[in-house]
Image (cartoon, grey):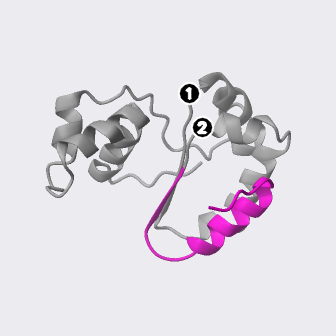
Amino acid sequence: MTHLSDSALAMYLYAGLTSTGKHLILLHEISWMGGEDKDFAGKLKGAWDNHFKKNDALNLVLCGSVTTWIEENILQDKGFVGRVSLDIVLKELSLPEANEFWRKAPSISATEKLKILSVTGGAFLAILKKFNTSKQRNRI
Protein backbone atom coordinates (compact mmCIF):
# COMPACT_ATOMS: atom_id res chain seq x y z
CA MET A 1 0.00 0.00 0.00
CA THR A 2 1.27 3.45 -0.90
CA HIS A 3 0.85 6.34 1.52
CA LEU A 4 0.23 9.63 -0.25
CA SER A 5 1.02 12.62 1.93
CA ASP A 6 0.12 15.19 -0.73
CA SER A 7 -3.60 15.51 -1.47
CA ALA A 8 -3.00 17.16 -4.87
CA LEU A 9 -0.98 14.13 -5.97
CA ALA A 10 -3.69 11.81 -4.67
CA MET A 11 -6.36 13.71 -6.63
CA TYR A 12 -4.19 13.58 -9.77
CA LEU A 13 -3.75 9.80 -9.39
CA TYR A 14 -7.49 9.30 -8.83
CA ALA A 15 -8.18 11.40 -11.94
CA GLY A 16 -5.87 9.25 -14.05
CA LEU A 17 -7.47 6.04 -12.86
CA THR A 18 -11.03 7.24 -13.46
CA SER A 19 -10.81 9.36 -16.61
CA THR A 20 -13.16 7.09 -18.58
CA GLY A 21 -15.82 4.57 -17.72
CA LYS A 22 -18.16 4.22 -14.77
CA HIS A 23 -16.47 4.90 -11.43
CA LEU A 24 -17.37 5.72 -7.85
CA ILE A 25 -14.75 7.61 -5.85
CA LEU A 26 -15.59 7.49 -2.17
CA LEU A 27 -13.50 9.86 -0.07
CA HIS A 28 -14.19 8.46 3.37
CA GLU A 29 -13.48 10.52 6.48
CA ILE A 30 -12.75 13.55 4.35
CA SER A 31 -12.35 15.71 7.45
CA TRP A 32 -9.28 13.66 8.36
CA MET A 33 -7.93 13.98 4.82
CA GLY A 34 -8.45 17.71 4.69
CA GLY A 35 -7.95 18.61 8.34
CA GLU A 36 -4.18 18.86 8.04
CA ASP A 37 -4.15 20.56 4.64
CA LYS A 38 -5.53 24.10 4.65
CA ASP A 39 -5.86 24.05 0.84
CA PHE A 40 -7.51 20.63 0.59
CA ALA A 41 -10.83 22.09 -0.61
CA GLY A 42 -8.99 24.09 -3.29
CA LYS A 43 -7.12 21.01 -4.47
CA LEU A 44 -10.37 19.04 -4.59
CA LYS A 45 -12.07 21.83 -6.55
CA GLY A 46 -9.12 21.96 -8.95
CA ALA A 47 -9.24 18.20 -9.47
CA TRP A 48 -12.97 18.39 -10.19
CA ASP A 49 -12.70 21.36 -12.56
CA ASN A 50 -9.71 20.00 -14.47
CA HIS A 51 -10.26 16.25 -14.42
CA PHE A 52 -13.20 14.58 -12.67
CA LYS A 53 -16.02 16.54 -14.33
CA LYS A 54 -14.85 15.38 -17.77
CA ASN A 55 -16.14 11.88 -17.02
CA ASP A 56 -19.96 11.91 -16.99
CA ALA A 57 -19.97 8.38 -15.56
CA LEU A 58 -17.97 9.36 -12.48
CA ASN A 59 -19.58 9.77 -9.08
CA LEU A 60 -17.58 11.48 -6.35
CA VAL A 61 -18.82 10.97 -2.81
CA LEU A 62 -17.45 12.87 0.16
CA CYS A 63 -18.32 11.41 3.50
CA GLY A 64 -17.20 11.54 7.07
CA SER A 65 -18.21 11.46 10.68
CA VAL A 66 -17.23 15.08 11.35
CA THR A 67 -20.10 16.69 9.50
CA THR A 68 -19.27 20.18 10.74
CA TRP A 69 -15.98 20.04 8.80
CA ILE A 70 -17.84 19.05 5.64
CA GLU A 71 -20.37 21.86 6.19
CA GLU A 72 -17.72 24.53 6.80
CA ASN A 73 -15.12 23.49 4.24
CA ILE A 74 -17.17 22.07 1.38
CA LEU A 75 -20.88 22.86 1.54
CA GLN A 76 -20.44 26.49 2.62
CA ASP A 77 -17.28 27.14 0.58
CA LYS A 78 -17.91 29.65 -2.24
CA GLY A 79 -15.84 27.52 -4.64
CA PHE A 80 -18.39 24.72 -4.42
CA VAL A 81 -21.56 26.80 -4.89
CA GLY A 82 -23.88 24.99 -7.27
CA ARG A 83 -21.71 21.88 -7.37
CA VAL A 84 -23.32 19.80 -4.65
CA SER A 85 -26.05 17.77 -6.31
CA LEU A 86 -27.08 15.62 -3.40
CA ASP A 87 -26.64 15.90 0.36
CA ILE A 88 -27.44 12.65 2.17
CA VAL A 89 -27.41 12.02 5.89
CA LEU A 90 -27.22 8.26 6.31
CA LYS A 91 -27.95 6.04 9.23
CA GLU A 92 -26.11 2.77 9.52
CA LEU A 93 -27.76 -0.31 8.08
CA SER A 94 -29.27 -2.76 10.50
CA LEU A 95 -28.16 -6.40 10.44
CA PRO A 96 -31.20 -7.48 8.35
CA GLU A 97 -30.62 -4.58 5.91
CA ALA A 98 -26.95 -5.45 5.56
CA ASN A 99 -27.83 -9.09 4.96
CA GLU A 100 -30.33 -8.04 2.26
CA PHE A 101 -27.68 -5.85 0.65
CA TRP A 102 -25.39 -8.86 0.25
CA ARG A 103 -28.21 -11.17 -0.92
CA LYS A 104 -26.86 -11.22 -4.50
CA ALA A 105 -23.39 -12.20 -3.29
CA PRO A 106 -23.89 -15.70 -1.88
CA SER A 107 -20.15 -16.29 -1.74
CA ILE A 108 -19.87 -13.84 1.16
CA SER A 109 -20.38 -15.73 4.39
CA ALA A 110 -22.40 -14.48 7.35
CA THR A 111 -19.12 -14.06 9.25
CA GLU A 112 -17.66 -11.85 6.50
CA LYS A 113 -20.85 -9.79 6.38
CA LEU A 114 -20.63 -9.22 10.12
CA LYS A 115 -16.95 -8.25 9.86
CA ILE A 116 -17.69 -5.72 7.12
CA LEU A 117 -20.62 -4.29 9.08
CA SER A 118 -18.48 -4.08 12.22
CA VAL A 119 -15.73 -2.15 10.46
CA THR A 120 -17.91 0.20 8.41
CA GLY A 121 -20.84 0.63 10.76
CA GLY A 122 -22.98 -0.02 7.73
CA ALA A 123 -22.35 3.45 6.32
CA PHE A 124 -20.50 2.27 3.21
CA LEU A 125 -23.21 -0.24 2.48
CA ALA A 126 -25.86 2.45 2.85
CA ILE A 127 -23.96 4.64 0.38
CA LEU A 128 -23.61 1.81 -2.12
CA LYS A 129 -27.27 0.90 -1.68
CA LYS A 130 -28.24 4.50 -2.40
CA PHE A 131 -26.10 4.59 -5.56
CA ASN A 132 -27.43 1.26 -6.76
CA THR A 133 -31.02 2.56 -6.57
CA SER A 134 -30.47 6.16 -7.69
CA LYS A 135 -30.37 7.36 -11.29
CA GLN A 136 -29.12 10.80 -10.25
CA ARG A 137 -25.57 11.75 -11.19
CA ASN A 138 -23.80 13.09 -8.13
CA ARG A 139 -21.27 15.87 -8.29
CA ILE A 140 -19.49 17.87 -5.69
Measure the C-alpha gap from mark 1 to mark 2: 6 Å
Q: Which mark is residue 29?
A: 2
Element carrying mark 1 = loop
Q: Is residue 41 left or right of residue 39?
A: left
Q: What element does badge 2 sit on?
A: loop
Indicate the position of residue 84 as horizontal and vertical percent values: 57, 43
Give the x, y percent position of residue 30.
64, 39
User: Does residue 90 lie above or below 106 as drawn?
Assistant: above
Residue 89: mark: none
Q: Is 62 above or below relative to 96? A: below
Indicate the quadrant where residue 135 lies: bottom left
Give above or below for 102 relative to 67.
below
Q: Residue at x 77, y 63 (%)?
A: 9
Looking at the picture, tell me which residue is in the foreground, 93 or 88: 93
Write down the residue under mark 1.
Answer: 65
Badge 2 amino acid = Glu
Q: Amino acid at mark 1?
A: Ser
Q: Residues within 10 Å of mark 1 (few under 14, many from 20)?
A: few
Dots 1, 2 in contact, CB < 8 A: yes
Foreground: 43 or 136? 43
Q: Position of residue 116 (x, y in %)?
A: 35, 41
Marked residue nearer the N-terminal end (1 or 2): 2
Give the residue drawn at x 86%, y 39%.
Answer: 38
Does any portion of residue 51 appear in the rendered image? no
Question: Looking at the image, which is closer to me, 119 or 37?
Answer: 119
Q: Residue furthest right?
A: 38
The question of residue 44 being in magenta is answered with: no
State which region is magenta.
1-26
Q: Position of residue 81 (x, y in %)?
A: 68, 41
